[in-house]
Amino acid sequence: MKRFLAIIMAALAFAACDPSEKKIENEFNAENIIDTKWEGTLKNVEGSAVKNTANVTLTFDSASAGKFTQKRSGAPTKESFDFTYSVSGKKITFDCPEISGTWEVSNYTDQVMILTILPSKSSVMTLGII
């Protein structure tokens, strides 16, 4: 009987730790980025060489709008732009002077997001949540 109770208690403890809950947090979807702020780098690549880089911040204020800030390497000041965006699957389309276009979310967790511009894949943003 004790063995039977131990098995039931172990099963209940295991069931209480639902692994799908953690998986949902690490899946990219539009709801997961609302009210988040990300900081990292934007690299523009030409051939196999990095053409230029910038330190960037993306703030997703709502389900369709946010703010983009960048400081290019060697530039004396930061530039800030408001943007609108839409999400379709693992793609984000930005309407913003510096990052306009469709970006593929090539990697996403609740702490890290990597975006690659489509179709050329000549720009990559590597971001961490702040």
Image (cartoon, rainbow, N blue to C red):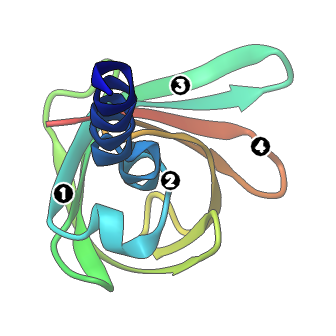
Identify the secondary structure beneath mark 4.
loop
> Which residue type carries mark 2?
Glu
Residue lying at 59% horizontally and 36% vertically, measured from the top left: 124
Q: Can you identify the residue that label 1 sits on?
A: 36
Q: State the residue position of label 4.
A: 121
Residue at (43%, 56%) from the top-left corner?
A: 24
The Cα atoms of the two marked residues, 2 and 1, are separated by: 15 Å
Q: Is residue 35 left or right of residue 26?
A: left
- Residue 107 appearing in the image: yes
Please name the residue shown 33% across and 29% down the image.
10
What is the number of callouts on the image? Answer: 4
Assign a secondary structure to mark 2. Answer: loop
* Relative horizontal placement of residue 9, taking residue 30 as reference (left or right): left
Give the CA distance from mark 3 to mark 1: 26 Å
**Label 4 vs label 1, nearer the camera:** 1
Marks 4 and 1 sit apart, C-alpha to C-alpha, by: 24 Å
Q: Which residue is mark 3?
A: 52
Judge whether 88 appears above or below 34 on screen: below
Q: Which mark is residue 111?
A: none
Label 1 is placed on what type of residue?
Thr
Q: Which of the 4 image quarters holds residue 54?
A: top left
Q: Nearer the viewer, residue 91 or 72?
A: 91
